[in-house]
Image (spheres, rainbow, N blue to C red):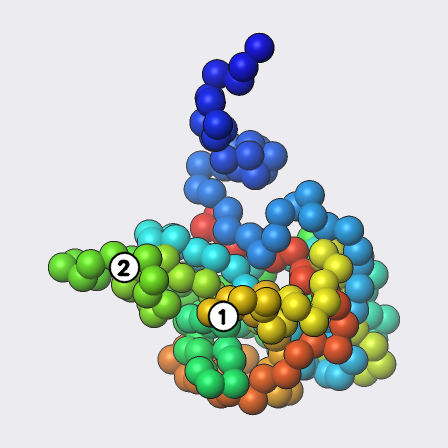
Amino acid sequence: MDMPGGRYPDYEQEWLLDGQPASQYRRSISRGDINTTAVTGAATQVPYVVAVPAQIGDVINFVTFGIGTLAGTAGSTSFVVVYSAMPTSSAAATVLGVSAATTFTAGANKIALAAPVSLVPTVGTPQNAAAQTNNQGPLVLGVAIVETWTTTGSQFDAMAGGSSAFKGLLTGQLPLVTKLPTLGGTPPTVGTSSGTTVTAPATGLVPYVVLSRT
């Protein structure tokens, strides 16, 4: 018997698996793609940036990710940053949102941003799907997990990656993950720039990161 919805499902499958939330989540990878728990970095407070596609009208208040094994000497000055794009060696990104300094825990970490990130369209501006700037269309945000530890990092729920997860295979493809220079214990200010000193992650890892309104 044919499926009644035809070639495509009537409802987005990840939304169904998420329990049909009233406000749909935005995520770096599918929850079904999680196949590893690995350490994102080997130095204190290296921002490990993950690509998360977002849509026009999204309002983001929380960044959620999972830690399988917590770093035994994690500090209290960890935080998350939401950038306007994936930082590259030729293009910096702007800080759109940031959390207060906190301590990550084992299991689910739902980190509140200090102020909402609202991707509200500009009245009179064509909603160009190719636009990569805030308020002009759908875009790919860069979400940085910045952790404090003194020996080694925590193991994050993730999908195993490789060098292609950083550089892409085709012209114009955005990296799925990247790293920025070390940040200090104070979260950056909204409106500041990420800079363009980026490197490929030392580990093949694409963490499962979820953005949500509630």
Residue for point 61% across, 87% down: 181
Q: Position of residue 192 (x, y in %)?
A: 42, 84
Residue 13 located left or right of residue 58? right
Circle 1 Cα neighbour tier, 10 Å, few/some/many (<14 / 14–19 / ≥20): few
Q: Residue 93 is drawn in which quadrant?
A: bottom left
Q: In this rendering, is residue 74 above or below 159?
A: below
Total numbered circles: 2
Q: Residue 48 is drawn in which quadrant?
A: bottom right
Q: Position of residue 42 (x, y in %)?
A: 78, 80
Residue for point 58% across, 84% down: 198
Residue 128 located left or right of residue 114? left
Q: Are marks 1 and 2 in contact (CB under 8 Å)?
A: no
What amino acid is found at the position of numbered circle 2 in the picture? Asn
- Does the image show residue 75? no
Tell me the SS state at disc 1: loop
Q: Where does the N terminus fall, quadrant-wise?
A: top right
Q: Mark 1 points at which residue?
A: 171
Residue for point 79% across, 69% down: 39
Tell me, for residue 128, which label it has, or none.
2
